[in-house]
Amino acid sequence: MNGRTLAVIYRKELLDTLRDRRTLISSILVPLLLFPLLTLGFGALAIFLAVKVTRDTAPIMILGEKNAPQLVRKLNKERTLEVLVPAPDYAKRINDKTLRAAVEVPENLEERLRTNPEENLQVVVYYFEGELRSQAAVRTIEKVVREYRDEIVESRFHERGLSPDLLKPFVAERKNVASAEKVTGNILGLILPYFIIILCLTGALYPAIDLTAGEKERGTIETILASPISRAELVGGKFLVVLTAALVTTALSILSLAVTVLGGAGLLQQISSKLVVAVSGKAAAAVFFLILPLAFVFSAVLLAVALAARNYREAQTYTMPLMFVVILPAMASFLPGVELNARLALVPILNISLVAKEIFAGNYPWPLIGLIFGSTCVYAVIALFFAYRQFQKEAVLFRT
Amino acid sequence: MIEAQQLRKVFRDKKRGEVRAVDGVSFYCKPGQIYGLLGANGAGKTTTLRMLATILQPTDGTAKVAGHDVVQEPDQVRTKVGFLSTATALYGRLTAREMVEYFGRLNGMENGKLRQRIDEIFTRLEMNEFRDRRCEKLSTGMKQKVSIARTIVHDPPVMIFDEPTVGLDVMTARTIVQFVRECRDRGKTVIFSTHVMSEAEKLCDNIGIIHNGKLLAEGTLAELRGRFGLEDLEDIFVKVVEGTE
């Protein structure tokens, strides 16, 4: 293998790839726009839903209104509830979703509360289990009922000359000790590894097809095979271009993500004011470093698979199953409770997904990181050898 | 020179089993001469020429091309060969100049020499007006010129043409035929495959008739005429091919 020849091939294939619109879209535009659009989309949706919820009112009924005028007044004051005239077919209406819930107040509730404090009384709320709006209405009703009950308790304490503080000898308070980076990272770590792995694959996909099946389709394969370069140099040059595309896509997606998260922090804080956003540069760099050998694997495997196809479309069909093979282990980061261990560290793709999750959360399990990097490097060498073998086979190169 | 020695190529096909595409083909071709491989589609012309260009490996037998063995030293053989066929397309997203430059570089040419050579070829083939246009935007005639420039940029002593005129219009085909002749006149060893009788008659110093992977008859046009007692090459061809069936 000659370095100068390799450089000549690399330069030409890169130029060729950069002049292909499909590659530009999949390797540069998509990773740059995906995260901003996803965030904006979800953010906008979340705000839209939040606004809609505050504006929407749930129709409810109070059965036995006259038994508890105070409670009725409180329920009427609740902005998200709309109290309808009671009717006996409330259960049917709840089933038909024209009514969200119904509150049944026992006979003479308020009077009995005054006269017989020891009596066990029951307020019943009728609702539709599993129906989101019905449950939302129930939550509001329960809140109002609870407040009403607390008021009664408080007034009873007052009547007996006791302080309501007796009920609360202490309070339990929550305090976050994780840094903003860890808090953000823990949330981001759930979904990010998946996106980064998939983008690394899609970044390599189109160049790989274009430089193999595309070359067959356009009839240039014979032209290049008749030139004095060796097959190893040809595979090498193509491989380096596909690898470049995979890495550029990955780097751009990580960059775009960081910008989106930092820039979109304001937006996120509107949804949860407790969320302080920060992304660690070290984590981003570490994940990129771990993706390196995986990008090797993807590039080599895609080249080998796409070369077996006769044309562009066939290559897309061949690489489709590969997408699923990658998507499933990449989703490991979504699963709660799947913890990284030495055995899982040997499972390709899945290991990167899990360790990236840890890294984003601020944990660096160095021995496992070493194991993952090492094992992925071994897979990369195997994949590269596989690609080289494919380029040696006449039956593959000249499949018609 | 080209010397094919008992070249054989066997493909394994799922449906047809073993296919002997080329079955013991030997011939010799001197510098300054055009050797024409004449045969119907599927006769084994393309496979033979691909083995000479080291794109395919012979199952058996070998060939010497410009002093190098196609099995032992395929990389050296390729530096001595210019290969042109209807299947050797151009990189559409490269410009005419980039295309020729690329193949010059792959042949190890230095920048200065390469630039000089490209200027010379582009002027001779009248390609300067479209030198910076992308190959995909060129007309068929222009594309053929780029292909020719690509084949000769490293000035190879051996030229292999695999049915270079198939599917081309009359004018473009003429440019190619003229170019093949020019290569011979410059002292190159030329091998040329075709199924067009008139082309073979006009161009070839030696003609080999190939059928079902076997070289059935060989000689100059005059020799073939004498041997078979027929004037027309087409009649000779039919007689040779039918004699085997």
Image (tube, coloured by chain):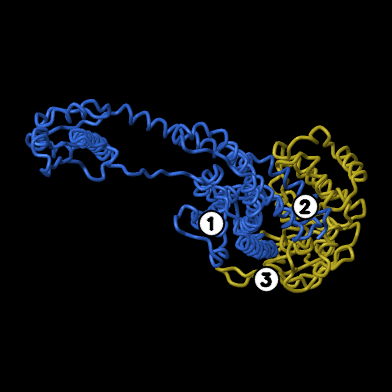
Comparing labels 2 and 1, the label whose residue is closer to the camera: 1
B17 sits to left or right of A338: right
* Pick the front one: A351 or A123: A123
**What secondary structure is marked by label 2?**
strand
Q: Which residue is mark 3?
A: B10
Residue drawn where x is 88% and y is 48% of the image: B182
In the rendered structure, are the residues bearing label 3 and label 2 in contact, judged by CB atoms less than 8 Å apart?
no
Q: Amino acid at mark 2?
A: Leu
Colour in which chain B is drawn: yellow
For this orientation, the residue located farthest to the front is: A161
Q: Amino acid at mark 3?
A: Val
Residue drawn where x is 62% and y is 50% of the image: A204
Does A12 sit above or below residue A296?
above
* Pick the front one: A335 or B200: A335
Mark 3 or mark 2: whose residue is earlier in sequence = 3
Crowding at dot 3, Cα within 10 Å, few <14 / some 14-19 / many 20+, comes out as some
Q: Position of residue B158 (x, y in %)?
A: 86, 57
- Chain bearing tag 3 is B
Q: Which residue is mark 2?
A: B84
Q: Amino acid at mark 1?
A: Leu
Res B96 visible: yes
Q: CA distance from mark 2 to mark 1?
A: 53 Å
* Pick the front one: A31 or A109: A109
Q: Position of residue A275 (x, y in %)?
A: 49, 38
Colour in which chain A is drawn: blue
